[in-house]
Amino acid sequence: MPHTLIIGYGNADRQDDGAAWHVLTRIASRLGRTVPPAPEEGFFPEGEEIDLWYELQLAPEMGEDFAAYDRICFVDAHTGDIPHEIFLRPVDDSPPASAFTHHLTPAACLALTRSVYGKNPEAVLLSIRGYSFGFARELSDETATLVDQAVDILWDWLKGS
Amino acid sequence: MPAQKLTIEPVTRIEGHAKVTIHMNDAGKVERAYMHVNEFRGFEKFCEGRMYFEMPYITPRICGICPVSHHLAAAKAGDALMGCPPPRPASLLRELMHMGQVIQSHGMHFFELAGPDLLLGFDADPATRNVVGLIQANPDLATKAVALRKYGQEIIKILGGRRIHPLFAIPGGVNKALKPEERDVILAGLDEAIATTQVGISIMRDWAEKNMEDINKFAVFPTGYFGMVTPDNGLELYDGQIRLIDQTGEQLEKFDGANYLDHIAEHVENWSYLKFPYYKKLGWPQGVYRVGPLGRLNVAEKIDTPLANEELKNFKALNNGNPVENTLYYHYARLIETLFAIERVRVLLDDPDILSTDILNTQRSFQGQGVGVIEAPRGTLIHHYWAEPNGQLTRVNLIVSTGHNNWAMSNAVDSVAKTYITGPEVHEGLLNRVEAAIRAYDPCLSCSTHAVGQMPMVVDVVDPQGNTIQTLRRNA
């Protein structure tokens, strides 16, 4: 199996913004891994065939870590501005700059991986529609349902190797 | 032609954090431009009822950009509330973590956010005027920039243990001492971090030399300046009094941050959820001021580390010793502060107390309320808690750095729009300058949630009847 990374990111304290955390915990269970009790305990790469990683946001130094993998699945959430409930697609090759924020997009991180570290892992983005972004750790009912579906989609992607 | 309204609206995960509206008059000129902050920050209410000792772990969740600043400000407010000043070694360690935050945040901003504008040009093709274009144009610089940010992050990680929401500062001190081998790891990366920052300063100087015309017409306006200083008015980022100067550089106030309510009031406008702080004695809007790197270097008379102090002399010479008013010099000031933060890391690590295990004051003397102030990378951050004797919070007031600069950002947008948009046809490069006016202040508008995929910038030209007559969209 190709060396695989599933990296989820978002703020688990802002409801559906943390959808990726919930996806990772379920994937961890299916893989028979220990599930951390809270998002702040995180998932971190441990050199497994399938590594799991959870962060608040993507950052440039991750480009170096990504170079160690054959394929990567980024797991994120999106607003209603994106016309899909769930999508799994290759990471876009034309990354934007975020005008006012310090987080990077998957494409920007991968550009670092390619340009600086000379690696080009296969990369997809799995994104789940968020409906509510208040100060709470519980998902909205709508997004919780989508998370269940997203886990199945991600599992199929993993098995497709 | 009919009056028009241009709207620049970054679409972020929480829709409509902020947008820019440019009102055009009948002659096709800019009449007035505004930056609106559309998101109400409900975080203070969320914190009420919590215990004071929870705040250093709750408040970092406010902001994905400077969680360490909130973490430390909350701990300092807890110190004051419970009357438990930390032992000196704990203060040194907190400051060390704070320097890590400043290094990573400032480094990220200059090289990854401002860099595309400065190195590739405001008018460069937006398809390449981004961090990837920067990497492709100069992969060696990109590698160094990544390493600089990583260096700051490593300091935070060594002290905080966790990578998400570090557990470190607690009211009365910190919960982990620094080990000798950890100190050595941090020291080992210091020279490279200084060298990279000096490369950044060279880039900034070269750019300024070639773009002086832009610098001198891009959002240059007088304000007061506000920031923390040492007792003899040196640059201070962790703990000290607040100094406020007027537009000529004369000192208006120097006060304990705990007394901020005696000096600051907040103005409300119906077009923005974010309030506008100002200096009470001068009133609104005469009392507006700026914070962050430009504000801090204007209030500081010196820097207590040699390399940064030399660079400060060059900064002070830009306006013959008077306050520097140019918004684009925020970038230069940010780099000088980065240099200071790295040099300060060495000072802290060389201090004999840095390895002490005397890191927690367990005495408690309840004070009823407490204020914690710190210079976050983007400006002065104030946490103020009121509590019951059992430590349960009854009221919370937070003034975030971006709030202090609210008027300045909106004024910068207005100034840049009027300067650069001189006719009815608005091309992308001009809009990018408007956006860059906000970016110079490095605001934290995203409130800890993030965009997915692209952040399109949409400009609608709307006639007085509300009809969209032109739409410009760029994939930022």
Image (cartoon, coloured by chain):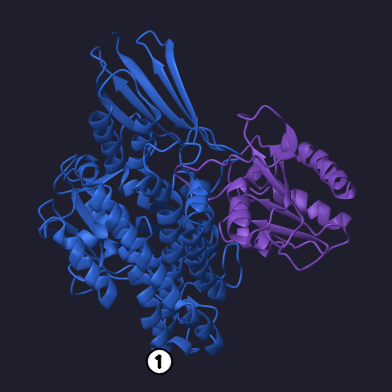
Chain colours: A purple, B blue
Task: Kindly tell me whether residue B107 is visible in this rendering.
Answer: yes
Say whether residue B464 is left or right of residue B160. left
Say whether residue B2 is left or right of residue B85. left
What x and y, as percent, mark residue B472? 45, 23
Q: Nearer the viewer, residue A54 or B170?
A: A54
Residue at point 73% right, 31% down? A85
Q: Nearer the viewer, residue A64 or A9?
A: A64
Task: Kindly tell me whether residue B85 is visible in this rendering.
Answer: no
Q: Nearer the viewer, residue B96 or B82?
A: B96
Residue at point 39% right, 72% down? B194
What x and y, as percent, mark residue B164? 60, 62
Residue B309 drawn above or below residue A135:
below
Residue A17 drawn above or below residue B390:
above
What x and y, as percent, mark residue B105? 44, 59
Residue at point 71% right, 52% down? A21
Residue type (three-letter) at the residue carrying disc 1: Pro
Total numbered circles: 1
Q: Report in which chain the residue with disc 1 lies.
A: B
Q: Nearer the viewer, residue B449 or B215?
A: B215
- Secondary structure under tag 1 reads helix
| Among the 4 quarters of the image, the one containing residue B205 | bottom left
Mark 1 surroundings within 10 Å by alpha-carbon count, few (fewer than 14), some (14 through 19), many (20 or more)? few
What x and y, as percent, mark residue B158? 56, 76
Residue at point 43% right, 15% down? B470
Quadrant in which the N terminus of chain B is drawn: top left
Query: Label 1, on which residue?
Result: B352
Say whether residue B333 is left or right of residue B111. left
